[in-house]
Each structure stands twice: as C-alpha cells, then as structure tokens.
Image (spheres, helix red, strand yellow):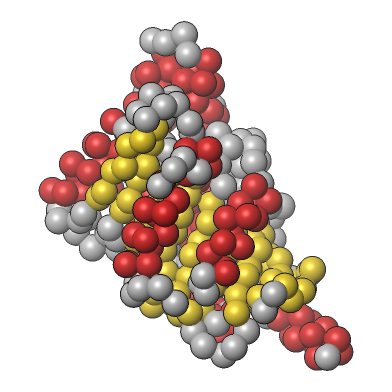
Amino acid sequence: MRTAVLVGALALAAVTVTTPATAEAAKDPTPAPVSTSDLSTLNGLSYETVSYGRERRQDMDVWWTADGTPRPGVFLIHGGWWSSGDKRQMTTIAREYADEGYAVFNLNYRLSGQAAWPAQRTDVLSAIQTARKHAARWGFDVKNFVVVGFSAGGHLAASVGTYGDGMNGLKGVVGLSPIVSPLRAYTDGAVTTDPYKRKLRASAIQLAGGCEPKGRCSRIWASMEVAWHASRHDAPMLTAHSADEFVPPVQSQLLKQMLGQVGVPVTVITTPGTAHSSAMYRQPGVSEQVHQWIAERLGGQL
C-alpha cells in the first residue's frame, strides 16, 4: 500500500499545470509543477499538500473522500490583512467541510509583502485551475463548487466571484467580514482613531504596491474594488459581518446593490457585537447559516 501511495505521489509530482487562461494569469506563461507531500488518511479522508505554482506560498491542502465519487468543492481562503496569515488557520474549518463530504481546498497565496495586487487574485484562480486539472484524483466535481474567504480572504473570494463575467462551475461565494471595498477602508481609516481601521487602510495601500488611490495608481485601486466588476453571470454571494466591527456591514451593502442591479442575489448577515472574521463565524448561528447556504447552492447535504 505504501508503495502504491508513493508511486501515485511521484506521478502527480511529474505533472505540470498551466495557470488560468486569463490575461491576468497569462502574465507568467511558465507551467508550474505540482508537488506532493504529507500524504495521509484520517477517518476515511485523504489529505495532501500540493503546489499550484512555483513561488513561495503557492500551495494548498486538499481533503477528499477517496471513494471514486465526484463531490462538490469548497475552496477556503484565510485572512490576515493581505500581509500575514496562513492556511493552517483554516484547518479546523477545512476538516468540518471535508467531514460533510465536500472536496476541500485550503489555500495559501502570495502575501502583499511578497507581491502586489493582483497576484493574490491570480493565485486563487491558479489554485482553482489546478483543482480542475487533477479533479479525478481528488474526487472533485468541477461543475459544482463555492469559494469561502475570511476578512482579506473574503476580499479575494469576492474578487474571484466578480472577475470576468462568471466562472464555470462556481455556484456561490461566501465572505466572512469581507473587505469588499479597499477604497472605503482607505477613506474610513483616514478619519478614525480606531487602530484596526487605520491598520486596514495601511494594509490596503501595501496591497496596491505602496501607492494611494490617485494618479497612476487609480487603475490598481479600481481593480481591487469588488462591486465595480459586477456582471450578470456572477455567482450568488453570502456575506456576514458583526454590526460594530472594523469591517462594517456597509462594505457588503454596496456589493448587494451593484450585483442586484444585474440580477445576482447577495445575502448579508449581520450579527451583534464586534467579533471579526473567524471569531464572528463562530458566533451562535452564523456558521450554521453559512453551511446551510452552501449546501443549498451545491445541491443539498451529501
């Protein structure tokens, strides 16, 4: 059995994949090899870590049920001001979705100190493309998946959701305290004493390559605005915020308005308090609503 596992791992490592066929991802036409490590089986689930590109942090953990049945996918994106954090923060949540029967892809991506926008969005698109490429190995139904992001990861998830005019197979996007509008965060951070809002403003500037939203940098900031890219074939979205957190619900209200104008539904959950991101996700009833919404988008409980 161990020999078979090693042979399978080596075979996957020998495969090369091409990043998404978009103008953005095509900036680096060099194929990225898929590498495999830490293969194990836990409680009927298979798990491995693979690279979807050649740069540091272009990797993801994959959890799947190895029974030969294609299953809906859940892509998870961690938060951390775009400049910190790691997929390890999402391990418990990844296991929850894997235990429900989904094929789960828990992503790392290049941080803003390593590469400026749009590298982060490109990485998520590349990870999805890699999952498509090796769908048979991971029992992944490429026509049925959602993307779930937390805080800065929520911005990346929503950005993927409005990139182009829809994505084949993407049935929904979930953002937990998503930074839908870096421009709004930039403005809010300039007129407040809240240290988190001020940090978020500085983080958005760093994401944009160190430039503020004026002059030559205005196009970069426009690219970072989720709602400005709404189109009628975008996937439905669910977002959740605490009423008084530093990424307020108004961030998602603009998204709801803009996507609503093109006929795409957006549901915004607001819970009392100041809890942010994964802490807010663990507030009573929030994760249950998220799981139910995802199950409805992906065709019911497995």
Q: Residue at x 47, y 20 (%)?
A: 197
Q: Quadrant of residue 81?
A: top right
- Position of the C terminus, as image quadrant, is bottom left
Q: Is residue 27 left or right of residue 54?
A: left
Residue 175 visible in the displayed image: no
Q: Residue at x 40, y 73 (%)?
A: 301
Q: Residue at x 62, y 84 (%)?
A: 66
The count of marks equals: 0
Residue 89 coordinates in the image, percent (x, y): 64, 47
Q: Quadrant of residue 144?
A: bottom left
Residue 91 coordinates in the image, percent (x, y): 65, 55
Question: Which one is in front, 267 or 170?
Answer: 267
Residue 136 visible in the displayed image: yes
Q: Is residue 295 left or right of residue 102?
A: left
Residue 192 coordinates in the image, percent (x, y): 42, 10
Q: Is residue 213 above or below residue 181?
A: above
Question: Which one is in front, 252 or 32?
Answer: 252
Residue 295 coordinates in the image, percent (x, y): 37, 67
Q: Residue at x 38, y 77 (%)?
A: 143
Extreme residue in the right direction: 3
- Position of the N terminus, as image quadrant, is bottom right
